[in-house]
């Protein structure tokens, strides 16, 4: 086994270099190596002080997340805590030298040292809450002693990173160094170690000056904020409890309390779900029959057809990544409208302080407009984003086939149309695929990469790599109506509407799913997308219905009344001048009329039924999507829903959520619904029946 922690002597200073590429994670062997190094230095009478430093680009960037998920995960954290205590107890001063990132266990290690110096471009943080955990090796007890209660609460409960200047100001580190790399930092650390080698040792665990005045208002305000911002998640609240304990208990007792809370979080569904989400985003980039060694096509220039909602947003995505874009429109007016929207979006970002004016102008300058296909002959990739009409799309692809250079990738942003039929308009179907961005394209992370029957492996590999370069998450989908996301959305939204006719109010349905953790209630989502757009997809979806089923009636009537959602001022809700939704009695009356028309007797519907009907309809369709091979793995469906449809990551996506509930429980609920509402809507998917019988889940463990 390679030596993960190297021991070397620089005169009378011992240097422990943590060398566990790529990010010096605290895998098994690293804490042990640090401890062994500290012991060796302690036993060497020539050594006056110890420096801990990371090899390569960073200090310890975190724990090895995979180890937490294992049965012995609590032991791993416990052992780290004990090793760090031993480092802190060392009789010779220990200096941690931080560059790159000192995150999670990395910052905990640094805080157990007696001094910290930090490169001025480095960052520190306790991001454990992002995977449903709290710091488990003393972080919640040492950080408040260095940085004070308020800062520790903020960092441990919300997981944000802290830049060097703030870290110095907060007292997390003792000195900043301008460095050009690891060698510089080492020089500075050695000089610092010599400077303090004779000073008395100050252990973080003994400090208490920043623990006084721990105002309960700080904890209460943080709890309120956590309940709002991180709805449904126990870890942020546990982190606040742990920091509060630091203000009340002696260090050793605080450490025990932290360990108890850590273990509770580690074994929680929420943490398992967030870890599933974390690894899921990496898994989805793998396509089994497209090896990672597949040579990629170069994408240096992009052209887009259509400067509407999607075309404009997609142009921003490429320009943001430094790739020049040409957009074609049909009229000068449409082109100007498109450019005005792009500029307005950038101006909003400038106003928020996240973009400078100069950077905005640079990004605008990379986007050129055209009323012809001029410039398209140089493009390495063309994205078509015109109206959702097959004939229009085919005509455009026939044009592109004549103009585009050989090897150019031709992508359609269609949300539901048959990619093979679009490809058939060209002489090069191997270069055609679907690249389905979500709205607003510049903000949403999901891109469904739709594989046609002829799409070449290098086109898929290039598109996947490109999605990553653009800061997106690409998920491969087979070419069938609605792909993964909109296909599964169908039954979910259908149930939301049927529940209205059966007796639930619009608010009941929206709130039940909000409480479940969805970013938005389903009917609020339709109001925001546009009821006409949603209805169009629903009508198209009927083409793949196996048996005629009961159809919700309300949305069709709302569209006929011109109630298209937020854009027309009213949809399921009505909107005031500040775009705030309000219940509308007119819609409540319309729902009752629809129920009468459908012969439905209205009843009181529980929140539990609302959630189960909507979510299990989604899961049942997900099982079909999986069985048909439209999604490669259950986790691909989960990632689509978490990154594109506001499904809570702390439930791990619909399929992981079903695994958590237990597939036999999901199945029996679906069978109840089938009895009540018929097989056309609720016949259980064969794969669900099979897996439930086998006692397995959709997601097999990733270990
Ligand atoms: P849109 O109506 O906002 O924009 C379409 C634009 O294409 C219009 O500006 C139109 O003038 C232009 N256009 C039409 N024919 C053209 C041609 N021959 N050459 C150049 N420009 C032409 O539509 P949109 O919402 O941006 O949708 C575009 C595509 O993206 C559709 O296929 C849609 O299904 C898909 N999509 C939409 C969303 C969404 O939420 N809006 C999300 C994902 C995918």
Image (cartoon, rainbow, N blue to C red):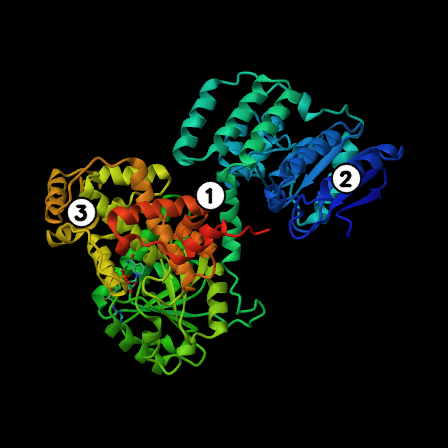
Which residue is at the front of the view, 677 or 409? 677
- As drawn, the label of residue 660 is 1
Which residue does the image show at 44% across and 55% down from the upper left? 690
What is the x, y in percent for residue 276? Answer: 51, 48
Q: Residues within 10 Å of mark 1 (few under 14, many from 20)?
A: some
Query: Which quadrant of the render holds ligand 1?
Result: bottom left
Which residue does the image show at 66% across and 22% down from the upper left? 252
Q: Does residue 357 appear anywhere in the picture?
A: no
Front: mark 1 or 3: 1
Residue position for label 2: 190
Q: Does residue 682 appear anywhere in the picture?
A: yes
What is the x, y in percent for residue 151? Answer: 53, 29
Q: Secondary structure at mark 2?
A: helix
Which residue does the image show at 61% across and 46% down from the upper left? 66
Going by the image, does 599 lie left or right of 78? left
Going by the image, does 520 lie left or right of 477? left
- As drawn, the label of residue 439 is none
Residue position for label 3: 571
Q: Secondary structure at mark 1?
A: helix
What is the x, y in percent for residue 570? Answer: 16, 45
Which residue is at the front of the view, 624 or 441? 624
Figure label count? 3
Q: CA distance from mark 2 to mark 1?
A: 51 Å
């Amino acid at each position: 086994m390679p030596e993960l922690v190297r021991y070397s002597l620089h005169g009378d200073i011992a240097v422990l270099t943590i060398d566990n590429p790529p990010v010096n994670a605290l895998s098994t062997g690293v804490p042990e190596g640090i401890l062994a190094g500290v012991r060796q230095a302690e036993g060497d009478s020539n050594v006056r002080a110890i420096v801990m430093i990371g090899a390569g680009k960073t200090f310890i960037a975190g724990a090895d997340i995979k180890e937490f998920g294992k049965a012995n995960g609590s032991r791993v954290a416990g052992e780290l805590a004990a090793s760090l205590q031993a480092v802190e107890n060392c009789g010779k001063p220990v200096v941690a030298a931080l560059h790159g990132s000192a995150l999670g266990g990395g910052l905990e290690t640094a805080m157990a040292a007696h001094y910290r110096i930090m490169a001025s471009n480095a960052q520190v943080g306790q991001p454990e809450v992002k995977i449903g955990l709290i710091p488990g090796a003393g972080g919640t007890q040492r950080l408040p002693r260095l940085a004070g209660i308020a800062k520790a609460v903020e960092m441990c409960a919300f997981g944000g990173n802290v830049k060097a200047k703030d870290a110095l100001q907060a007292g997390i580190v003792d000195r900043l160094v301008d460095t050009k790399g690891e060698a510089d930092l080492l020089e500075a650390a050695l000089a610092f170690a010599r400077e303090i080698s004779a000073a008395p040792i100050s252990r973080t665990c003994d400090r208490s000056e920043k623990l006084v005045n721990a105002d309960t208002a700080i904890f209460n305000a943080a709890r309120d904020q956590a309940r709002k911002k991180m709805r449904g998640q126990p870890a942020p609240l546990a982190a606040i409890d742990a920091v509060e304990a630091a203000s009340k208990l002696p260090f050793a007792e605080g450490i025990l309390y932290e360990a108890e809370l850590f273990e509770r979080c580690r074994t929680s569904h929420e943490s398992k779900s967030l870890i599933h989400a974390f690894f899921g985003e990496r898994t989805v980039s793998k396509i089994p029959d497209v090896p990672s060694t597949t040579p990629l096509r170069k994408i240096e220039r992009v052209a887009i057809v259509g400067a509407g909602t999607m075309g404009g947003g997609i142009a921003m995505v490429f320009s943001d990544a430094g790739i020049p874009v040409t957009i074609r429109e049909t009229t000068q007016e449409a082109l100007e409208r498109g450019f005005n929207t792009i500029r307005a979006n950038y101006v909003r970002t400038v106003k928020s302080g996240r973009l400078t004016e100069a950077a905005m102008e640079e990004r605008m300058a990379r986007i050129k407009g055209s009323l012809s296909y001029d410039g398209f002959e140089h493009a390495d990739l063309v994205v078509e984003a015109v109206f959702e009409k097959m004939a229009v799309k085919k005509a455009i692809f026939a044009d592109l086939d004549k103009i585009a250079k050989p090897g150019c990738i031709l992508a359609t942003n269609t949300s539901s149309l048959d990619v093979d039929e679009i490809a058939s308009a060209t002489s090069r179907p191997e270069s055609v695929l679907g690249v389905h961005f979500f709205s607003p394209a510049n903000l949403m992370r999901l891109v469904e990469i739709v594989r046609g029957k002829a799409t070449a492996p290098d086109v898929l590999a290039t598109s996947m790599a490109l999605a990553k370069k653009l800061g997106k998450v690409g998920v491969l989908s087979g070419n069938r109506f609605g792909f993964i996301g909109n296909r599964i959305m169908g039954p979910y939204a259908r149930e939301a509407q049927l529940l209205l006719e059966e007796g639930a109010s619009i608010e009941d349905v929206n709130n039940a799913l909000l409480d479940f953790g969805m970013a938005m209630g389903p009917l609020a989502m339709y109001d925001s997308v546009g009821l006409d757009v949603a209805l169009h997809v629903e009508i198209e979806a009927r083409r793949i219905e196996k048996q005629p089923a009961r159809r919700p009636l309300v949305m069709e009537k709302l569209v006929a009344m011109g109630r298209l959602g937020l854009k027309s001022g009213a949809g399921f809700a009505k909107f005031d001048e500040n775009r705030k939704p309000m219940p509308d009695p007119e819609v409540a009356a319309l729902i009752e009329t629809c129920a009468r028309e459908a012969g439905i007797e209205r009843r009181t519907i529980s929140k539990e039924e609302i959630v189960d009907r909507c979510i299990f309809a989604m899961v049942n369709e997900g099982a079909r999507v999986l069985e048909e091979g439209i999604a490669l793995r259950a986790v691909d469906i989960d990632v689509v829903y978490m990154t594109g449809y506001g499904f809570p990551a702390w439930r791990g996506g619909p399929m992981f959520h079903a695994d958590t509930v237990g597939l036999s429980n999901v199945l029996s609920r679906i069978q109840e619904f089938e009895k009540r509402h018929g097989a056309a809507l609720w016949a259980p998917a064969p794969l669900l029946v099979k897996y439930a019988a086998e006692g397995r889940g959709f997601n097999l463990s990733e270990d």
